[in-house]
Image (cartoon, helix red, strand yellow):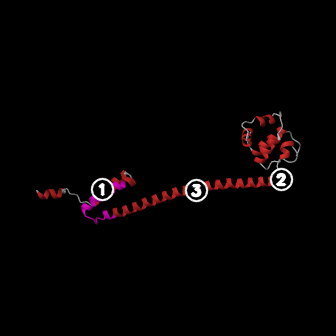
C-alpha cells in the first residue's frame, strides 16, 4: 500500500467503518471530535494513545499503519475475520428478511383462511335456507308454521340476497303456500 498521511488514513478508517468523525470520537471515548478534526485538517497526527484506543475498539486495524502508515491498513487475520463477519452479517440480514416475508405470508394465509371459512359458512347457511324454502314451497307444513317461517326467511334473505330478492321470495311463498282467506267472487254469489 502506498504511504499515506494521517488525514488520508483517518478518511480510510472512517470509510472502512462507515461512520462519521463524531461517532468515531464518541466510540473512542472522547467528548468531542476536535482531535479527529485536527487530524483531518492535517494540523496534527495520530497519537499513540488514539491509535491504541482505535485498535482496542477495532482489532482488525494495524496499529503501525494507523500511527505511521507502515504496512497494510488491516491485519491479515483480521481481514479474514472481517470477511466472515460480513458474510455472517449478510446471512443474518437475509434470514431476518426471510422471517419477515414468512410472517407476512402467514398473516395473509390466515386472513385468506378466515375469509374462506366465512364464505363456506355463508354457503352452507344459504344451502340450508334454500332446502327449507323448497320444503316450505312444497306445502309440507301448516299455515301457521309457514307464516312464522316466512317471516324468518324474509329477514334471512334480506341480509343475504338483498331486499328485492327477499320480496320476490316472500311473494312466491304467499301465493303458493298460504291459501287466500278472502272469499272468491263465485263464493260471494252463492252465499247471498
Q: On the image, numbered disc 3 is attached to which residue?
A: 105
Point out residue 149 in the picture as x, y percentages from the top left corner: 30, 59
Q: Is residue 102 magenta?
A: no
- Pair 1/3: label in front: 3
Foreground tag (2 vs 1): 2
Q: Residue at x 27, y 58 (%)?
A: 148
Please name the residue that numbered disc 2 is placed on: 76
- The residues tagged by marks 1 and 3 sit, at their Cα atoms, a distance apart of 44 Å
Tell me which label, 1 or 3, sits earlier in the chain: 3
Over which residues does the magenta segment extend?
134-157
Q: Which residue is painted at 33% across and 57% down in the image?
A: 153
**Mark carried by residue 35:** none
- Depth order, front residue of 110/41: 41
- For marks 2 and 3, the one nearer the N-term is 2
- Tag 1 residue: 151
Please tell me whether the stretch drawn in magenta is mainly helix, strand or loop: helix
Residue 99 figure quarter: bottom right
- Mark 2 or mark 1, earlier in chain: 2
Q: Nearer the viewer, residue 4 or 24?
A: 24
Percent position (x, y) of residue 32?
A: 73, 36
Q: Please give left or right for residue 80 compared with residue 119 in the image.
A: right
Q: Please give left or right for residue 55 compared with residue 165 in the image.
A: right
Q: Residues within 10 Å of mark 2 (few under 14, many from 20)?
A: few
Residue 20, how many percent across, how many down? Answer: 73, 40
User: Looking at the image, which is closer to me, 132 or 72?
Assistant: 72
Single out the mark in the foreground, 2 or 3: 2
The residue under the point 31% across, 63% down is 136
Residue 19 location in percent, x, y?
73, 42
Amino acid at each position: 500500500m502506498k504511504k499515506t498521511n494521517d488525514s488520508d488514513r483517518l478518511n480510510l478508517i472512517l470509510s472502512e467503518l462507515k461512520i462519521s468523525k463524531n461517532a468515531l470520537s464518541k466510540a473512542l471515548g472522547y467528548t468531542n471530535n476536535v482531535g479527529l478534526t485536527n487530524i483531518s485538517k492535517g494540523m496534527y497526527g495520530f497519537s499513540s494513545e488514539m491509535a491504541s484506543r482505535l485498535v482496542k475498539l477495532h482489532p482488525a486495524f494495524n496499529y503501525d499503519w494507523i500511527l505511521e502508515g507502515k504496512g497494510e491498513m488491516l491485519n491479515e487475520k483480521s481481514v479474514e475475520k472481517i470477511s466472515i463477519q460480513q458474510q455472517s452479517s449478510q446471512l443474518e440480514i437475509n434470514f431476518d428478511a426471510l422471517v419477515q416475508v414468512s410472517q407476512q405470508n402467514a398473516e395473509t394465509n390466515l386472513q385468506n383462511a378466515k375469509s374462506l371459512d366465512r364464505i363456506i359458512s355463508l354457503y352452507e347457511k344459504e344451502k340450508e335456507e334454500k332446502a327449507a324454502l323448497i320444503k316450505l314451497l312444497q306445502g309440507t307444513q301448516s299455515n301457521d308454521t309457514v307464516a312464522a317461517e316466512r317471516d324468518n326467511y324474509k329477514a334471512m334473505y334480506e341480509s343475504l340476497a338483498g331486499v328485492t330478492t327477499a320480496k320476490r321470495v316472500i311473494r312466491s311463498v304467499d301465493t303458493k303456500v298460504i291459501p287466500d282467506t278472502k272469499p272468491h267472487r263465485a263464493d260471494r254469489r252463492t252465499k247471498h
